[in-house]
Amino acid sequence: MSTVTTVITEPAAGARGAARAVYIAFIGSGFTMASWATRIPQVRDELGLNPSRLGLVLLAIAAGSIVSLVLAGQIVARFGSRGTVTAMAGLLLVALSAVGIGYPYGVAPVVVGLFFFGFANGAWDVAMNVQGAVVERHLGKAIMPRFHAGYSVGTVAGALAGAAAVALHLPVTAHLVGSAILVGVIVMLAVRNFGADDTQPQAEQDGGGGGGLRRTLATWREPRTLLIGAFVLAFAFAEGAGIDWISIAVIDGYGAPATVGTLAFATFLTAMTVGRWFGPALLDRFGRVIVVRALAVLSLVGLMIFVFGPNTATAFAGALLWGLGASLGFPVGMSAAADDPAKAPARVSVVASIGYCAFLGGPPLIGFLGDHVTVLTALTAVAVLLAVATAVANNLRPLSPETPVLPEPERERELI
């Protein structure tokens, strides 16, 4: 077993530096998303949007993400995770600044800015998950949920900063532009420490031409990959509904002030952070399938308390359980998609593309239902997809043991 130990421990020092860079990439992504989310009520009021029209505006983020994710496997395989995150951080800086500067002038600049905001987030997401899987393999332990906890840390920090900005009446423009510049610059500097990806550049893998595209299309026909995508979609819907609508549901459904709605959103994000930080111990002990099924039930219970509770206090309790239950679905799905290093970019891209359909369909669905039964009641739609997640969770089982698969004679000698 000495050969295996050498393979894992030799790159460990560099992997630790790469791990710090991955954390920063996840934190930065979460911070910008929460910064935008905390100002949705003010942008809505400025533009005079009802729930269904707001849902269509929010659809722009998901549309940009979907376009990006369809291309992300090819982009990351060709330019590497480092180059991809660097470019997308620059694009995000411009896009979020455009939203902050453009929203007083109407819906059009907001929609365009949000589209490119979503595009940047989509490719950034795939690239940092691919690099996270590389670090995970080099360190020899499961830490992907903790990288996603970094995303949640970023969202909590962004939500708290947003709550402070709302309470202090900081203009939306100053808040969003400042956040974009801060995150864009820090992330572009940090990702210089990303390590080399495990896969060869796409042109070398496929000999140029259309081989990479054929390989990506073939990945869309893999049953396990598609079912993992359905699982991720369900948890992404639960997570995205909370991010987009919790603050508005508390403000409109419980008659709470804007600051209280933002704090309920921060409670949801804090619970997700806690779940992602401590989740790896549960995954190591009980395995992926049992843990995610239990968390789906917990999220469902929290959702029902949030929607049907009698007052704002129970809404906060429901948001906490909802966030805790939704915490591990997305990162565990990404780890499952990346089980095979050679196919990780394509599979992560496919799974993320399917998962982001929740962000594509979720905002308009909740907004449409909200026009008829209130936003608070419309959130019960999340329960349906959580049931789907529990049904397909068996597909998250690892493809192979953590250690490399040895040829048959060598495996027999190891067993002896």
Image (tube, rainbow, N blue to C red):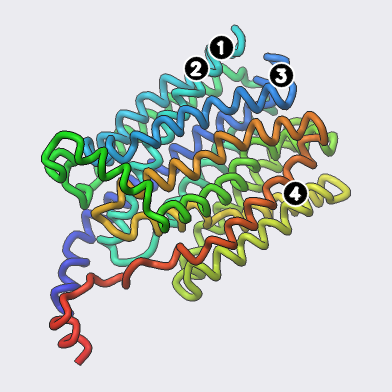
Spot occupied by residue 408 in the image (x, y as percentages of width and height): 17, 80
User: Relative to 400, is 33 on the left or the right?
Assistant: right
Q: Earlier in the sequence, mark 4 or mark 3?
A: 3
> Residue at label 3?
49
Instruction: Say which residue appears at 15% left-offset and 38% top-offset.
Output: 203
The circle drawn on residue 308 is: none
Disc 4 residue type?
Phe
Frontmost of labels 2 and 4 is 2
> Residue at label 2?
112
Disc 1 residue type?
Ala
User: Relative to 133, is 96 on the left or the right?
Assistant: right
Q: Is residue 204 placed above or below 303 in the rendered structure?
A: above
Dot 1 and dot 4 residues touching (CB under 8 Å): no
Q: Is residue 214 placed above or below 118 in the rendered structure?
A: below
Quadrant that contains the N terminus:
bottom left
Dot 2 and dot 1 residues touching (CB under 8 Å): yes
Question: What's the CA distance linking mark 2 and mark 4?
Answer: 34 Å
Question: What's the CA distance linking mark 1 and mark 4?
Answer: 34 Å
Q: Is residue 183 visible?
A: no
> Residue at label 4?
316
Q: Earlier in the sequence, mark 1 or mark 4?
A: 1
Q: In what element is the residue under mark 3?
A: loop
Q: Nearer the viewer, residue 365 or 268?
A: 365
Instruction: Say which residue appears at 65% left-offset and 47% top-offset.
Output: 268
Question: Counting other residues with Cα less than 10 Å from the Cα at mark 1, is it few (<14), some (14-19), or many (20 or more)?
Answer: few
Q: Earlier in the sequence, mark 1 or mark 3?
A: 3
Question: What's the CA distance linking mark 2 and mark 3?
Answer: 17 Å
